[in-house]
């Protein structure tokens, strides 16, 4: 199962973000495509892809509760809409051999909110994910989206938010008890991109004038529960810098003038390893 | 000895936020002929604590004027924190029982008011209010609740769920 996420930044029509998406979906054989800030009709995009693809895609069901995420999915999957909030949505994929929960988020931007507000959203999200896991009796959970925070920030690491840790040995312990309350962990493989000497340095560039400036940020992330460690293909995890015909970068940075201020991210899940 | 109680007692006639919402849950079920369900469930998570700006909108006058300050609910309702009630109010449907769209959280102490409402971001934006609203009385609570229930956002979600219910009914009728 190939999963793609991209914050398309209000669909810059100069270059045609749809062309890039169509190329990516077909080239990467994507099964699930999740988009943030995609302002066009995803059903139209779906039809365009269906006209030239061997795979038939359908929009991810949405009842209007979540307005920040859109997407489409290979029609072969049976999906159920579990939870919708303004900034996130949780869906369940169920086959004869496994259940998989996918949480999709576009968290509030640092430009409009404090770190505490970002943390608050992720805390609600995590609570809803845990509730969905409980009611659907599965911990096979993958979260993907624009967290608007780096992997090392409190809002990503804190036990009372999404508790996403980069160390497999620690994540395998599954949960941690803090002051009498148990917090389950996620594995965050995105840390491997920090400090890369080669492009892509990150998924988002922002040069501020403050004392602390990270320049390159990994706001777009994929995290998984330890139950999916054997299914997650580490080497598949990628920050995508180009499609067949389009270079999404200008120099070292995402080319927001022509495409988006974010780069897409991609990963593969081996379905046969999901228990 | 004469009666030293110089008062006549009468039970408080105030309705709790929980009772008020539960009545609206019943109304929605009646209005949609049982297809759509609104529920109020106890919530065991932490619901609000961050810096917020003052309420400036017209509807904002319903809530207390909070100004710019840190809202730490544990402290705001701190004197009665051990007796706080926290609920989440959400919409689901008979044909999608596994689905949830949460409209808001409410939090109050043993005196019921003030009640804190933590509203869905898009409804807050549509009504031009802050996400966190503290209401001082039952009257104010009912006033803001009416606006929330009649928001375009809730209408959109309910209509989408009704469409699913209709499709399910058609499937069953074949």
Image (tube, helix red, strand yellow):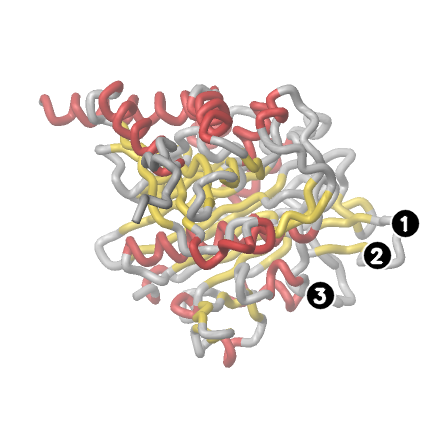
User: Regarding mark 2 in the picture, which secondary structure is present there?
Assistant: loop
In front: mark 1 or mark 3?
1
Chain that bears disc 3: A
Q: Nearer the viewer, residue A4 or B44?
A: B44
Chain that bears disc 1: A
Q: Residues within 10 Å of mark 1 (few under 14, many from 20)?
A: few
Q: Residues within 10 Å of mark 2 (few under 14, many from 20)?
A: few
Q: Is residue B53 visible?
A: yes
User: Regarding mark 1 in the picture, which secondary structure is present there?
Assistant: loop
Going from N to C along the chain, the mark reached first, 3 or 2, is 3
Determine which quarter of the picture holds residue B11: top left
Q: Nearer the viewer, residue A226 or A161?
A: A161
Say which residue label 2 marks. A213
Image disc number at residue A33: none
Residues tagged 1 and 2 counted as in contact (Cβ below 8 A): yes
Question: Does A51 sit left or right of B124 as displayed?
Answer: left
Chain that bears disc 2: A
Say which residue label 3 marks. A194
Gap in angstroms between the C-alphas marked 1 and 3: 21 Å
Say which residue label 1 marks. A209
Check chain identity for marks 1 and 2: say if they share one: yes
């Amino acid at each position: 199962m190939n999963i793609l996420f991209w914050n398309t930044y209000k669909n810059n029509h100069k270059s045609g973000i749809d062309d890039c998406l169509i190329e990516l979906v077909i080239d990467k054989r994507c099964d699930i495509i999740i988009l943030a800030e995609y302002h066009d009709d995803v059903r139209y995009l779906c039809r365009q892809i269906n006209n030239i693809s061997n795979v038939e895609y359908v929009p991810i069901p949405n009842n209007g509760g979540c307005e920040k995420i859109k997407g489409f999915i290979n029609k072969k999957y049976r999906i159920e809409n579990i939870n919708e909030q303004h900034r996130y949505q949780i869906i369940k994929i169920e086959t004869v051999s496994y259940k998989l929960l996918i949480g999709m988020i576009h968290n509030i931007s640092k430009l409009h909110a404090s770190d505490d507000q970002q943390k608050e959203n992720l805390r609600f999200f995590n609570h809803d994910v845990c509730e969905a896991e409980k009611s659907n009796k599965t911990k096979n959970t993958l979260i993907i989206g624009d967290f608007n925070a780096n992997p090392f920030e409190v809002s990503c690491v804190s036990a009372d938010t999404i508790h996403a840790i980069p160390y497999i040995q620690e994540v395998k312990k599954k949960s941690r008890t803090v002051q009498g309350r148990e917090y389950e962990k996620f594995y965050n493989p995105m840390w491997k991109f920090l400090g890369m000497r080669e492009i892509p340095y990150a998924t988002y560039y922002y040069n501020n004038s403050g004392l602390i400036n990270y320049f390159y940020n990994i706001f777009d992330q994929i995290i998984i529960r330890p139950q999916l460690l054997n299914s997650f293909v580490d080497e598949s995890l990628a920050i995508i810098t180009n499609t067949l015909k389009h270079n999404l970068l200008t120099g070292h940075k995402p080319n927001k003038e022509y495409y988006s201020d974010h780069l897409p991210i991609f990963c593969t899940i081996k379905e046969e390893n999901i228990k | 000895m004469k009666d030293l109680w110089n008062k006549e007692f009468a039970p408080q006639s105030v309705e709790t936020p929980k009772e008020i919402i539960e009545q609206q849950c019943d109304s929605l079920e009646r209005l949609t002929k049982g297809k759509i369900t609104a529920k109020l469930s106890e919530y065991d998570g932490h619901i609000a604590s961050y810096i917020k700006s003052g309420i400036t909108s017209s509807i904002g006058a319903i809530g207390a004027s909070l100004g710019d300050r840190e809202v730490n609910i544990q402290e705001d309702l701190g004197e009665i924190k051990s007796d706080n009630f926290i609920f989440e109010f959400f919409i689901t449907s008979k044909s999608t029982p596994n689905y949830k769209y949460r409209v808001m959280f409410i939090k109050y102490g043993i005196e019921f008011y003030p009640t804190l409402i933590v509203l869905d971001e898009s409804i807050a934006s549509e009504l031009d209010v802050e996400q966190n609203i503290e209401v001082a009385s039952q009257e104010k609570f009912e006033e803001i609740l009416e606006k929330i229930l009649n928001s375009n956002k809730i209408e959109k979600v309910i209509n989408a769920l009704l469409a699913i219910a209709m499709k399910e009914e058609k499937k069953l009728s074949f």
